[in-house]
Image (cartoon, rainbow, N blue to C red):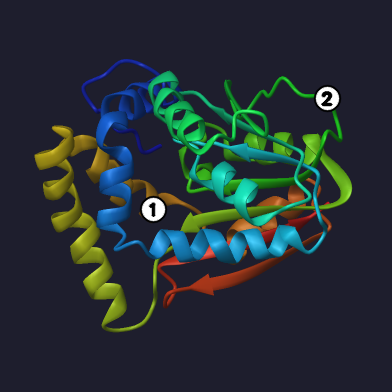
Amino acid sequence: MTIPYTDSDKSKKGQIVDMFNNIAPKYDFLNHILSLNIDKIWRRKAIKEIKKNSPRTILDIATGTGDFAILSAKKIQQAEKIVGIDISENMLQYGNEKIAKLGLQDKISLLVGDSESMPFENNSFDAITVGFGVRNFENLEKGLSEIYRVLKPGCTAVILEFSMPQHFPIKQLYTFYFKHILPTIGKIFSKDYDAYYYLFQSVQEFPYGQKFVELTKKTGFQNTKIQALSFGIASLYICTK
């Protein structure tokens, strides 16, 4: 199992909490800079998928600083209640500041919580979004089962996650950037090299593509479609309960 800090005796989940609490002050800045803002395009594609069903209640899992939740509030007029959940209090603090500046407090609420054991009843939400969060689950199958449990029957969860491109030269450029450039820039701005090197390692380890589709089916989803994004740098999984 890939972990952020090899010198820590904490569980993966405990280390993930520490990692995101550490990088929270520079997270938004680095996230958009290091992805060249392509992540914003990917999120819009995901929102288009759940918008088709006009969801009124939306859950954003591993919400971080709330980008996905905020985009849902802006793009889906029918949305009445959007809940974001994350294990990092520091990330949520910055998320709440953004939400307050946009005047979206009445629509969006952020909660500290474990995505693998969520405090919601079965069949609670019309749609679920996850942006680059399932890769950090300590138990991926358990986390997917929770997503399935709290989603209403017939509704959709959209999961954005990094994947490994397979074709030359994208694969080689992507690997070099993730392994060498990204951790160095991350260290300069966030003072945490390990956090951004972990990103590369966790992407390599993650069961992307058809392997991930099989996991969603194993946890109950009737149908999962894949959209490859930006030459396979990321994938959008559209999972229907």
Report the residue at 40% width, 37% height from top.
1
Report the residue at 14% width, 56% height from top.
180
Q: Residue 11 appears in which quarter of the rendering? A: top left
Residue 112 is situated, as x and y percent measured from the top left of the image, at: 55, 19
Q: Please, which residue is most extreme toward the bottom here? A: 168
Residues at circles 2 and 1 in contact by the CB criterion of under 8 Å: no
User: In the visual, does 225 lie left or right of 69?
Assistant: right
- Amino acid at circle 1: Val
Q: Residue 58 appears in which quarter of the rendering? A: top right
User: In the visual, does 64 lie left or right of 200?
Assistant: right
According to the picture, the residue beneath numbered tag 1 turns out to be 203
Q: Please, which residue is most extreme toward the top here? A: 9
- In front: mark 2 or mark 1? 2
- Residue closest to the eye, 136 or 139: 136
**Of pointers 2 and 1, the one earlier in the residue sequence:** 2
Report the residue at 9% width, 41% height from top.
188
According to the picture, the residue beneath numbered tag 2 turns out to be 121
- Amino acid at circle 2: Glu
Residue 110 is situated, as x and y percent measured from the top left of the image, at: 58, 26
Judging from the image, what secondary structure is the residue with disc 2 in?
loop
Q: CA distance from mark 2 to mark 1?
A: 31 Å
Residue 82 is situated, as x and y percent measured from the top left of the image, at: 68, 37
- Residue closest to the eye, 241 or 204: 241
Report the residue at 82% width, 59% height from top.
53
Residue 187 is situated, as x and y percent measured from the top left of the image, at: 13, 40
Query: How many labels were placed on the picture?
Result: 2
